[in-house]
Amino acid sequence: MKAKLLSEGLSLDPEERIRLAQDLWDSVSEVPSSDPLTELQKQELDRRLQAIQERPDQSIPWKKVFQEIRDLK
């Protein structure tokens, strides 16, 4: 069954595959017990969040980054 799902996913065009990957990732992050992060990764995310909060003018919103990536096509 997994091979069939993978095959179907790979048959999608790139934009649809990106959307599928995002939807899958979102579904994983919605489950509290599925936290795949190590303590070190959590600390790094906390450090980055603090840096953004301290210097918001130094950060770029994800939507802008994503749009710039899509514009590279």
Image: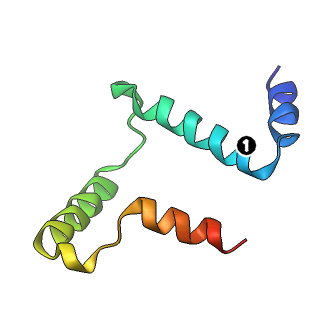
Q: In the rendered picture of this protein, how many numbered marks are placed on residues?
A: 1
Dividing the picture into quarters, in which one does residue 1 lie?
A: top right
Q: Is residue 53 left or right of residue 3?
A: left
Residue at 52% x, 62% y is: 66
Q: Amino acid at mark 1?
A: Glu
Q: Dot 1: within a 10 Å radius of its alpha carbon, few (fewer than 14), some, or many (20 or more) residues?
A: few
Dividing the picture into quarters, in which one does residue 48 lie?
A: bottom left
Name the spot of residue 72 as percent of width and height, x first.
67, 75
Name the spot of residue 44 as percent of width and height, x first.
28, 63
Residue at 48% x, 31% y is: 28
Q: How is the image coloured?
A: rainbow
In the orientation shown, which residue stands out farthest toward the top? 1
Q: Secondary structure at mark 1?
A: helix
Please state, as top left, top right, bottom left or bottom right, where the C terminus lies in the image.
Answer: bottom right
In the orientation shown, which residue stands out farthest toward the left? 54
Along the line of sight, which residue is nearer the eye, 41 or 31? 31
Name the spot of residue 39 as percent of width and height, x first.
28, 51
In the orientation shown, which residue stands out farthest toward the bottom? 58
Residue at 44% x, 66% y is: 64
Q: Is residue 42 left or right of residue 17?
A: left
Q: Residue tagged by mark 1?
A: 16
Task: Identify whether 48 is placed above or below 17.
Answer: below
Residue at 88% x, 34% y is: 7
Name the spot of residue 4 as percent of width and height, x first.
87, 26
Q: Is residue 49 left or right of residue 66?
A: left
Q: Is residue 31 left or right of residue 54?
A: right
